[in-house]
Amino acid sequence: MTGKRFIVTGGAGYIGSHVCVELVKAGCQALVIDNFANSSPKALDRIAEIAGEGVTLLKADLADPADEARIIDAVKAYKPDGAVHLAGLKAVGESVVEPVRYYSVNLPATFTLIRALEAANARLIVFSSSATVYGDLNQSPVDEKGATGATNPYGRTKFFIEEMLNDLARADARWKICNLRYFNPVGAHPSGKIGEDPNGVPNNLFPFIAQVAVGRLPKLKVFGNDYPTRDGTGIRDYIHVVDLAAGHVAALNYLTREEAPGAVVYNLGAGRGISVLEAIAAFKRASNRDIPFEIAPRREGDIAEIYASPDKANRDLGWKATKTLEDMCADHWRWQSGNPNGYRD
Ligand code: WQD
């Protein structure tokens, strides 16, 4: 991979910044396309502090037609080998309230990226998909043959984009596509310099717990303790964001070395489930802070339990998650305690 150059859309974001660090560490360069709608330019400075130079920026909105020509020109000039496509709206609850906004951002952003890569003759995309494309399967571990059935507009945009990329690869064999279905990314780079910095009150469990631990939020609500699970609370497959980012480098390696892989799909999960109460206890140990919580009603749309079978990615990509729940909590806490207000400090 040394010397390869990739477009990283959403590269200033939580997952994207960690992907950029791993790409630079692998001897690659990255052109980040980001509109900073849910990210900070400071993340790019921190990437350089961690991994050195190698990342350049194009501030643009992939979903804005007025930016398309500028984006295509910049991508052609960069002469990339492909792209990692992370840019998009990603809040499940928000997508239920504003479905058309989600479709009118996530889909057109992908069309623009495809047109830019075609113009640059760089027909390779690793796409940030999500385990949300699986419905309520009621059986874990989930492998890539699991029935899809997204239950919210956000998840449907991810599923539609996967299917569109699959159709593109079927129509034109020059395209190489890898859809990566993330389970629950948490944690932060061990340096504590980059991490999750959600706008507003976090929807997701780990950033919420971290903000309670650091004193930004008073108490956590545990959404239901009457699920059919070992302790009654929801079980998910939390995966360290550095493991997840390494999965992207492994996917790019796979696509660049395979002659004609077409479109492939992999789960990126650790392959084991952790409950809400277990996560709270682990974060208390890592932070040595109290995490006040109360049991609240179930959250609409939540399922009891889901975790990945990561065997296919292990077999084909030579990738597996290595970091523990303790690593995730310690690294997330180091980021949060060092940056109580995220990049706003
Ligand atoms: C995890 C568990 C909650 C918050 C979502 C998206 C998915 C992906 C990851 C983008 C559940 C419980 C949560 C809280 C709680 N995002 N919880 N109190 O819902 O599994 O997945 O984020 O790709 O697409 O669907 O993650 O962190 O919101 O919830 O009790 O304040 O924590 O009920 O059991 P989820 P989550």
Image: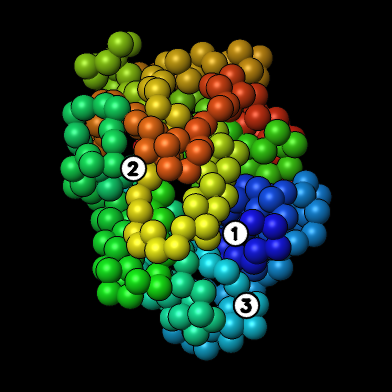
Identity of the residue furthest to the front in this view: 259
Residue 257 locus on image (x, y percent)? 52, 57
> Is the residue at mark 2 in contact range of ligand 1, meaning its CB lies under 8 Å from it?
yes
**Disc 2 crowd, CA 10 A, few/some/many (<14, 14-19, 20+):** many
Q: Residue at x 40, y 27 (%)?
A: 271
Circle 2 — which element?
Answer: helix
Q: Amino acid at mark 2?
A: Ala
- Asked whether disc 2 touches disc 1, contact meaning CB atoms under 8 Å apart, the reply is no
Residue 289 locus on image (x, y percent)? 63, 17
Location of the N terminus by quadrant is bottom right
Position of 123 relative to 284 (above/below): below
Tag 1 residue: 11
Tag 3 residue: 79
On residue 276, the disc is: none
Q: Amino acid at mark 1?
A: Gly
Circle 3 — which element?
Answer: loop
Calculate the distance from the C-alpha at mark 2 to the C-alpha at mark 1: 21 Å
Left or right: where does residue 165 sit relative to residue 278?
left
